Image (tube, rainbow, N blue to C red):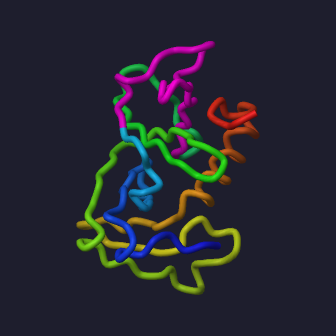
Amino acid sequence: MAYPSRPETTPGYVAARLDDTTLLLDLLAVPDIRNDADTVQSNGRKVLRRNGRDLELVPLAGSMQSLADGRRTQIMVVADKKGEFALCCDDIRVLPAAKLNIQPLRRCMSGPESLFVGTAKIGETIAFLCNAEDLGNITRQFWEQEHGKLTSNPD
């Protein structure tokens, strides 16, 4: 598993809260952050229009939280080698790399199947560092088991 960028190589990180979990991603892997007011309905699904393409919204939290009417959602567009995907989050913050003390995940907590590779304390919260490739693979696998191919995937 590749370790995401170090503070010396990225301007910052995106902290995205999904229910009680906060993910930390390299800012360079997050080309866009929006709110749900920027979404539209297309073929019965909520999508984010970006660069002439519809990115299907993936509510990756808990057991795939519903996109209930009235729930204010922030959307983080993540780019990996397979394209872009849009994750629904409860809260998104951009943090300068210099303000974070990222620690590698302890050996007893990591493994080849682990999404997380490090941690950082943000206020009273522990954020889990992951890279866009692993997050993309897990997101697509999880979503496609339930709903079929993501509309943001090529082909």
Count of numbered badges drawn on the protein: 0
Is residue 39 found inside the magenta-colored segment of the image? yes
Between residues 30 and 126, which one lies in front from this camera angle?
Answer: 30
**Rendered image quadrant of residue 42:** top right
Q: Position of residue 76 (x, y in %)?
A: 43, 43
Q: Which residues are magenta?
A: 34-61
**Rendered image quadrant of residue 71:** top left
Between residues 31 and 76, which one lies in front from this camera angle?
Answer: 31
Point 46% across, 71% down: residue: 5
Would residue 94 be found to the left or right of residue 115 on screen?
A: left
Point 65% across, 73% down: residue: 1
Relative to 149, residue 100 above or below: below
Q: Main secondary structure of the magenta part?
A: strand
Would residue 1 be found to the left or right of residue 129 on screen?
A: right
Point 46% across, 24% down: residue: 68
Between residues 108 and 40, which one lies in front from this camera angle?
Answer: 40
